[in-house]
Amino acid sequence: MKLFAFSLRPYDELPVLQRLADEHGFEFGWTSEYPTMDNAGLAQGYDAVTIITNPMPAELLARYAELGVRGLATRSIGFDHIDLDAARSLGIRVGHASYPPAGVADYTVMLMLMALRKAKLVDIASSYQDFGLRGKIGRSLNTCTVGVVGTGAIGEAVCERLAGFGCRIVACDPYPKDRLRGRVEYMTLDELLACADVVTLHAPGLPENEHMIGAEQFARMKDGVVIVNAARGALIDTAALIDAVESGKVGAAALDTIENEADLYYRDLSRDVLPNRDRSVLMAFPNVIVSPHMAFYTAEDVRAMIFNSAGALLAFSRGEETPFEVRA
């Protein structure tokens, strides 16, 4: 196999990929650039391409197919940034990565605690020597009902961590897990939204889940509800969220992902005007935390993302089956 890696980070991903290539004897080339039509030619002579959460439209996939690419893998669990229909029609097999749920689950609980304890407001005030307490009172997690939307691997790991805080945990999922019963009370989404003090989202980024939380859903929630999203930005209607924050319906939000973020991460844009007005608005609120889609970012997860995505491409090159092939 000859693999070309786009958007590869030299400071953490490159050493892992190099070690894997040495172990399995494949060649690879790489660039830190995002894949575009302008640099598609870098994949010339390679039969496999790996990306991160970069948009993969039909036009770009067709160009890769012309260059001889037969396998594409994203170094992420989600694959909604890839035109799967186009890939199939071009004969390109698509893979994705899996990684341990602990990193995202830990980060989710951290965001929850930061939102409940008004960490952003406290940090901002402290930076200009406001050490007073007015307006900074928080809430203990053990007094809350936490609603977990989606109990896949990450949602389940979040439930396991929350159990140690002594809070009430409610959840909704089309496929309830028997091993969580007794610690978690399953209910419908509407029932969850009505009773939860904190709502944390862990549903997949499927088309049917787009804007599963919008104006109608916010209206059903408790006043002052805390919203946490470390899953997919499209799960929340951003315009409706902004309205809910401004009205006070949402007391705090902690977001590791928002809509229309694909062109932002993972680059240094500190000198640029961001082409994402919603993100700028959300960041201006003292009670909204927005982090740059990095809940996954642990040494363990980065290693797994490289190993599993490259492993899928190795399987493709050998004509083998792999659990990391996208079949949706």
Image: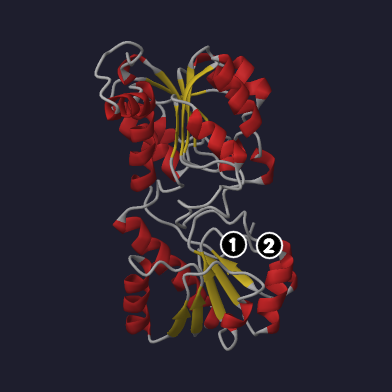
Front residue of 106 and 269: 269
Tell me if residue 321 can be seen. no
Query: Can you say whether 251 is above or below 296 in the image?
Result: above
Front residue of 165 and 29: 29
Which element type, helix, strand or loop, lies under badge 1?
A: loop
- Specify the label residue 326 is tagged with: 1
Residue 70, percent from left and from top? 62, 79
Find out whether the residues at labels 1 and 2 contact each other: C-beta distance under 8 Å.
Answer: yes
Badge 2 is on which residue? Answer: 84
Tell me if residue 26 can be seen. yes
The residue lying at 47 percent from left, 61 percent from top is 97
Query: Can you say whether 174 is above or below 32 in the image?
Result: above
Front residue of 181 and 247: 247
Q: Amino acid at mark 1?
A: Val
Q: Amino acid at mark 2?
A: Leu
How far apart are the two marked residues, 1 and 2, measured between alpha carbons? Answer: 9 Å
The residue lying at 68 percent from left, 62 percent from top is 84
Residue 179, percent from left and from top? 39, 35
